[in-house]
Amino acid sequence: MSDLEVNTKKISQKYRTNVPRLIRAWKKGISDPEISRHTGINVTTLYQIKSELELAHRRVRVARKRESVDDTPVYAQRHILLRPLL
């Protein structure tokens, strides 16, 4: 696993639950109370897991953005609406 990926295994160990299964449930649109009833995890713990995952994804996106900015010159990154790219 590279540095630019979210480590769900580590989060699973921290909360002693199957985080990929929770992610699949959230992607399917199942609400937190329903997930809590099926898994036995407290709703506040689900909220903590969700916020930790969101923070990790945000960090990955920022790191990827920084990586892409470092590769290209600054003038190529900015586009002014009324002027073509130089």
Image: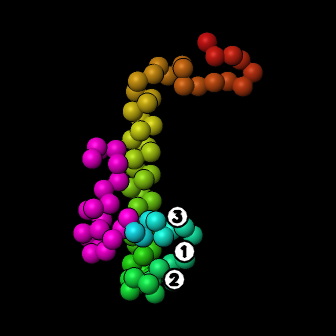
The answer to whether marks 3 and 2 mark residues whose Cβ atoms lie closer than 8 Å is no
How far, Cα to Cα, is label 3 from label 2? 13 Å
What residue would you read off at disc 1?
30
Whole-number angstrom distance, CA of label 3 to CA of label 1: 8 Å
Left or right of 36: which side holds 17? Answer: left
Amino acid tagged 3: Lys
Q: Which residue is mark 3?
A: 27
Q: In this image, 78 relative to 16: left or right?
A: right
Residue 51 visible in this rendered orientation of the protein: no
Percent x, y of residue 65: 45, 37
Quadrant location of residue 50?
bottom left
Q: Residue at x 51, y 82 (%)?
A: 34
Q: What residue do we see at 41% from left, 38% from top?
A: 64
Where disc 3 sits, the SS reads helix
Dot 2: element:
helix
Assess disc 2: are there few (<14), some (14-19) or many (≥20) residues with their C-alpha within 10 Å of its C-alpha: few
Q: Is residue 31 left or right of residue 2?
A: right
Cα separation, mark 2 vs mark 1, equals 7 Å
Q: Which residues are magenta?
A: 1-20
Tell me which residue sits at (58%, 25%) in the image. 78
Which x, y percent locates residue 66? 41, 35
The residue type indicated by label 2 comes to: Glu
Give the vertical position of 10 relative to 32 (above or below): above
* Secondary structure under the numbered disc 1 in the rendered image: loop
Disc 2, disc 1: CB below 8 Å?
A: yes
Q: Relative to residue 53, is residue 42 depicted above or below?
A: below
Q: Residues within 10 Å of mark 3 (few under 14, many from 20)?
A: few
- Quadrant of the image occupied by residue 79: top right
The residue that disc 2 covers is: 34
- Color theme of the render: rainbow
Q: Is residue 86 visible?
A: yes
